[in-house]
Image (cartoon, rainbow, N blue to C red):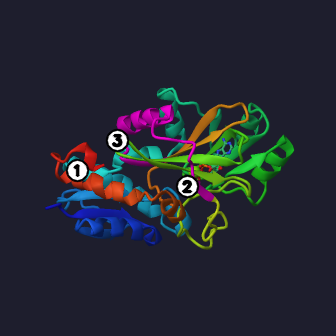
Amino acid sequence: MTPTVHILFENAAWLAPLEKALSDRNIPYELHFLEGGTLDLSAEPPEGIYINRMSPSSHTRGHQGGVQHVRDLLVWLEAHGRRVINGSAAFELELSKVRQDLALRHFGIRTPRTIAVAGTEGLKEAARRMELPFITKHNQGGKGLGVKLFRDLQAFDAYVDGPDFIEDPGGVTLLQQYIKPANENITRVELVDGAFVYAMHSSTADGFELCPAVECSADDAFCPVGDSGKFKVADDFTADDELVAKYAEVMAAYGIDVAGIEFVLGEDGLRYTYDINGTTNYNLDVEAESGVEGMAYIAALVERIANPELSLSAK
Ligand SMILES: Nc1ncnc2c1ncn2[C@@H]1O[C@H](COP(=O)(O)OP(=O)(O)O)[C@@H](O)[C@H]1O
Ligand SMILES: [Mg+2]
């Protein structure tokens, strides 16, 4: 008997595939919508296995309080010995591209050169230390927030001073080397519990943004709702790619059970990894094409946690 799974979430639109995967295996679950909350530190958390599905882009749906609450909640759950899929260490990494970059580089994975600037004062000076072109992005990313390309410093200065500049929720803006994609796409590698699920290409022909969820907030100009054709199975990327083993190492070191990790192949023939998504959403078109169901991997992980004697072949 699998114990109850507690799903911590803030965007209901992303739940259905996970609920289906759990139901398919008769795994009982409870939903916990978190846009903020109260935490009694002397209380005992319910028994069960927890899945953290909080998104770093929660604030764009009015749920920034949820991120802060869940940061504490995860530590509280772990203090009571509860197993959290993508627990506190994974979440801290997910909320900071600075931490992601340092973690990736620690394991010898190439990343684009990046300068992180807290506040806005230092931005223009930092830009003068970057080679052009460069991009800006939010440290707490998700769905391409603040991602803009700059080919000259005048345009950058005007952006910083102008009305379009939106600050990252934690106030940290990244300036990052722009890697022009060799093939007008990026690759996103999906992994669960260190195992390769599949990889997909996401077209950059129409610009940057690329959250693969089929259901994303429809008012978000960046989100590819209904935009089928943008995401394709990456047939040229297989489980034996050396990046898979390296990504698995990062995941093991930072307690990341579930991740979609993105890299871009530059015109120099080198691959640059730039984003680790813990709250990964599987693209249904890609799943239909590949015949692989990502959420089933998460459900299988739940079963292995509940029944450690299950063989790894159950992956
Ligand atoms: N250094 C880069 N060079 C070129 N394109 C990039 C770079 N970083 C990000 N992008 C593009 O912008 C998109 C969003 O950036 P990303 O870092 O993944 O932010 P988010 O966490 O918001 O998804 C990427 O999918 C990619 O298309
Ligand atoms: Mg991304």
Circle 2: element type: loop
Q: Image height check: is 242 above or below 181? A: above
Ranked by sequence position, the earlier of labels 3 and 1 is: 3
Query: Residue 138's spot in the image, x, y percent?
Result: 61, 49
Q: Is mark 2 within 8 Å of ligand 1?
A: yes
How crowded is the residue under tag 1: few (<14 C-alpha within 10 Å), some, or many (20+)? some
Residue depicted at 37% across the width and 53% down the height: 71
The residue nearer to you, when weighing 254 against 126, is: 254
Residue 254: quadrant of the picture = top left
- Give the amino acid at mark 1: Arg
Q: CA distance from mark 2 to mark 3?
A: 20 Å
Residue depicted at 23% across the width and 57% down the height: 49
Say left or right for 113 vs 287.
right
How crowded is the residue under tag 3: few (<14 C-alpha within 10 Å), some, or many (20+)? some
For disc 2, the marked residue is 142
Count of residue discs: 3
Say left or right for 290 vs 71.
right
Circle 3: element type: loop
For disc 1, the marked residue is 304
How crowded is the residue under tag 2: few (<14 C-alpha within 10 Å), some, or many (20+)? many
Which numbered dot is residue 161? none
- Give the amino acid at mark 2: Gly
Asked if residue 288 can be seen in this view, the reply is yes
- Specify start and end residues of the magenta stretch as a single range: 231-260
Say left or right for 79 vs 266.
left
Q: CA distance from mark 1 to mark 2?
A: 29 Å
Q: Which quadrant, please, contains the N terminus?
A: bottom left
Query: Residue 183's spot in the image, x, y percent?
Result: 71, 44
Which numbered dot is residue 255? 3
- Give the amino acid at mark 3: Gly
